Image: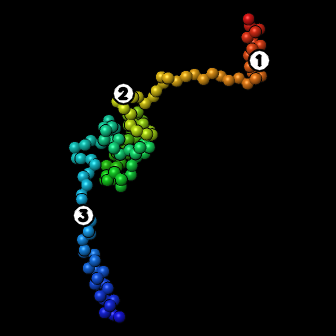
Amino acid sequence: MYKSKRKRLFLKSKRLFLKSKRPFRRRLPPIQSGDRIDYKNVSLISRFISEQGKILSRRVNRLTLKQQRLITIAIKQARILSSLPFNGKPFEKGESAARTTGLKKKKKKYSSIEFKFQSKLKSNVN
């Protein structure tokens, strides 16, 4: 029994040094050394936002801690300055954050008592 236990320990230690069968391909970093992380660089920032407008995690982005912090700050600044939307896809070039054209004013709805009162007021004025 003692020999078999020693043999098992030896096999376990040998397994640690075996190479994995899947080949490892090193991925390129998402931010090159020349890229400036800034709220004005919307094309760079928009790569780190999901379809719903959420900031993607550091693990998904494959960023360093410092890069992720800078990206987060830049995204928040761009949202405040209306370069990026708070939710959804980034704006197109000619599209602005606030759209006021095409809005219709709602007519005020009166209850039956208010309607009768309004009609009496109109008849008295005339």
Instruction: Give the spatial CA distance, label 2 vs label 3.
Output: 46 Å
Lower sequence index among marks 1 and 2: 2
Point out which mark residue 10 bears: none
Residue 13 locus on image (x, y percent): 28, 80
Q: How busy is the neighbourhood of tag 2: few (under 14 within 10 Å), some, or many (20 plus)?
A: few
Work out whether residue 112 can be spotted: yes
Q: Is residue 24 left or right of residue 110?
A: left
Front residue (pair 16, 25): 25
Lower sequence index among marks 2 and 3: 3
Count of numbered circles on the image: 3
Residue at point 40%, 38% (across, down): 89
Q: Is residue 82 left or right of residue 37?
A: right
Q: How busy is the neighbourhood of tag 3: few (under 14 within 10 Å), some, or many (20 plus)?
A: few
Residue at point 33%, 41% (across, down): 45
Q: Are marks 2 and 3 in contact (CB under 8 Å)?
A: no
Dot 1 falls on a residue whose secondary structure is helix
Q: Is residue 17 above or below residue 32?
A: below
Mark 2: amino acid: Gly
Instruction: Give the spatial CA distance, label 1 vs label 2.
Output: 49 Å
Q: Which residue is mark 1?
A: 117
Lower sequence index among marks 3 and 1: 3
Residue 104 locus on image (x, y percent): 55, 22
- Quadrant showing the N terminus: bottom left
Residue 53 locus on image (x, y percent): 42, 42
Instruction: Give the spatial CA distance, label 3 vs label 1.
Output: 83 Å
Q: Is residue 104 above or below residue 65?
A: above
Q: Which residue is mark 2?
A: 94
Residue 119 locus on image (x, y percent): 75, 14
Residue at point 32%, 35% (across, down): 40
Dot 3 falls on a residue whose secondary structure is loop
